[in-house]
Image (tube, rainbow, N blue to C red):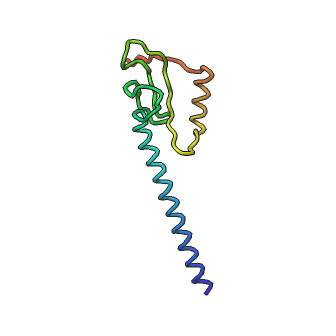
C-alpha cells in the first residue's frame, strides 16, 4: 500500500510542477508580447514613432519629439512590466544611474 501511495503522490507532484512550468511560460510569453505592443497601448509615455526597441537590459529608448519635429525634448529609458513583476537588480542599477545623472553621450569612431 505504501508504494502505491508513493507513486500517486509522485505523479501528483509531477503534474503540479508541469502546471507551474506551463503557467510560468505563459507569463513570460505574455510579458514578451506586451513589450512588443506596449508603444501602441494607452498611456504609453511617448509617440511610438519616437521609440527604439533595445530588449536587454531595458526594453526601449525613446526620443520624444524626433518623429514630429526637429527638436528632441528628452531621452527616455523605458522598461515595460506586466502584472506584479518587479525590476531586476540590473534594471534597478540602470534606473539609479540615470536618476543620479551618471549618463554620458559617446561618439565612437571606428577606423
Q: Is residue 56 left or right of residue 89?
A: left
Q: Residue 74: x, y in percent?
A: 49, 18
Residue 33 appears left or right of 19: left
Query: In the current view of this chain or complex, which residue is farthest to the front?
Result: 42
Residue 79 lies, with reference to residue 31, above or below; the image says: above
**Farthest residue, direction bottom:** 1
- The percent coordinates of residue 24 (x first, y second) are 50, 54
Q: Toward the viewer: 20 or 103?
A: 20
* Residue at (44% x, 43% y) in the render: 32
**Residue 95 position by quadrant:** top right
- The image shows residue 9 at horizontal and vertical percentages of 58, 75
Q: On the rendered image, what quadrant is the N terminus found in?
A: bottom right
Residue 94 at x, y percent in the picture: 57, 30
Q: How many marks?
A: 0
* In the rendered image, the vertical position of residue 36 relative to residue 74, given as above or below: below
Position of 52 compared to 92: left or right? left
- Along the line of sight, which residue is nearer the eye, 24 or 67? 67
Residue drawn 58% across the image and 36% down it:
90
Q: Quadrant of the C terminus?
A: top left
- Which sits in the foreground, 36 or 43? 43
Please give the name of the residue rendered at 60% of the width and 38% of the height, measured from the top-left corner: 89
Amino acid at each position: 500500500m505504501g508504494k502505491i501511495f508513493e507513486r500517486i503522490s509522485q505523479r501528483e507532484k509531477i503534474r503540479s510542477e508541469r502546471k507551474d512550468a506551463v503557467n510560468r511560460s505563459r507569463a513570460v510569453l505574455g510579458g514578451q508580447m506586451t513589450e512588443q505592443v506596449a508603444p501602441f497601448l494607452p498611456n504609453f509615455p511617448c509617440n511610438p514613432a519616437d521609440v527604439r526597441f533595445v530588449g536587454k537590459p531595458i526594453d526601449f529608448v525613446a526620443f520624444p519629439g524626433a518623429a514630429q519635429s526637429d527638436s528632441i525634448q528628452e531621452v527616455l529609458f523605458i522598461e515595460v512590466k506586466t502584472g506584479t513583476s518587479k525590476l531586476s537588480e540590473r534594471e534597478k542599477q540602470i534606473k539609479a544611474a540615470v536618476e543620479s545623472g551618471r549618463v554620458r553621450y559617446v561618439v565612437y569612431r571606428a577606423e
